Image (cartoon, helix red, strand yellow):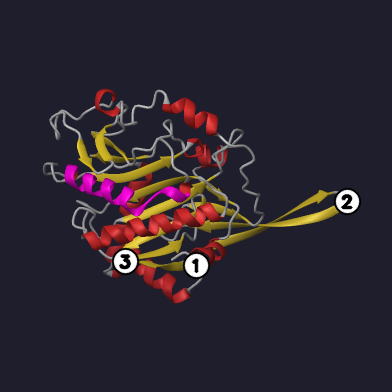
Amino acid sequence: MEFRKEVEVAKVLLNDKVEETVVEIRYDPLTLQTSRVIKKTPPFVVTHGFEEEVESTKSWCPFCPERIESMVARDPELLNGELLKRNEAVLFSNIVPYSRYSFVIRLTEAHYLDISEFKKEHFEDAFYLIKEVLSKLGDGKYYISIGMNYLKPAGSSIMHPHIQTLVSETSTDYFARMDWSALEFYEENNTDYWLALLQKEKELGERFAGETKKTGWISAFSPKGFYHFIGIPEEREFFEMSGEQISGICDGIIRILKFYKSKGLNSFNISMFLADRLGEHFRTNINIVARTPFDKYYWCDVYFPKMFHDESISYLIPEEYAKELSEFM
């Protein structure tokens, strides 16, 4: 396992003074995909509120309690047209499916939550509903992932807090890269990549942020966005996870959201790649990144390097923000 990077120094003349900026091109230790860490952090500041948008979107939101029964799509195959419910969480079909089985889980009855208002139970209830629907799958190999976009900078078309689950017979591009690379690593080392990564990061100490129940948390060496953290659970397959393991994952997510709040951030993405049905070489892993703050005049942080070069840009140093997160663990 190698933490490889190249370093370039850019110089600009500004106000008769030469300013130097260090750019690190980092290689993901598993897939060798690159990202660029630019050591020049922009300010993350919410300058205008968006209360007007919260209220205006509430009037038509299909996920609000008064509309969800009549407006959401339902699965006719696995769920026979029924909705799955657990406390405030409700699972239903995505009206615009991304895969053979494409589900949405409404997390809360509240139409909008400040990033500090999410509770561990919101995610726990959603994950138990996902486990329930996965229990209804027939035999076969599937690539299963869980994702969340919160607020417009993260790509969410609906403000109401929700997550998604994709169950596909064909992997997404990055999922396939991880699968192939993890299999090669397993065959060479007789252990899965994520266990080896967590052990290595604990030894180095630079990017290890801390632990919640049965889950280790590190900052990604080659980040895919701002404040990219990776959760590595002790139990490998999502469907087989104990209540203690689910609790540890959800607790870690909430602690990271509180950390984001301390940084003035309010928008984020989550992606969980599940090991279920893939084999011993793969371990469920949780990825979470912050997005630029949403306000009346928010700006997007995905541009041509990501769209066309498939290369992420981060202005934040993983080794530095891992230490900062450790105070929340």
Disc 2 marks which amino acid?
A: Asp
Q: Amino acid at mark 3?
A: Lys
- C-alpha gap between disc 3 and disc 1: 16 Å
Measuring 13% from the left and 42% from the top, which residue is drawn there? 136
Binning the other alpha carbons within 10 Å of mark 2 as few (below 14), some (14 to 19) or many (20 upward) gives few
Q: Is residue 54 magenta?
A: no
Decide which of 230, 247 is in the foreground and name it. 247
Vertical side of 19 occupied by 306: above or below: above
In the image, residue 276 above or below residue 82? below
Residue 127 magenta: yes
Q: Disc 2 or disc 3, which is closer to the eye?
A: 3
Give the labeled residue for mark 2. Answer: 16
Q: State which tag comes first along the sequence, 1 or 2.
A: 2
Q: Relative to residue 232, is residue 150 drawn left or right?
A: right
**Which disc is residue 327 wearing?**
1
- Residue, disc 3: 213
Residue 181 in sight from this viewpoint: no
Mark sitting on residue 284: none
Check disc 1 and report its element: helix, strand or loop. loop
Residue 70: percent from the left, percent from the top?
Answer: 25, 23
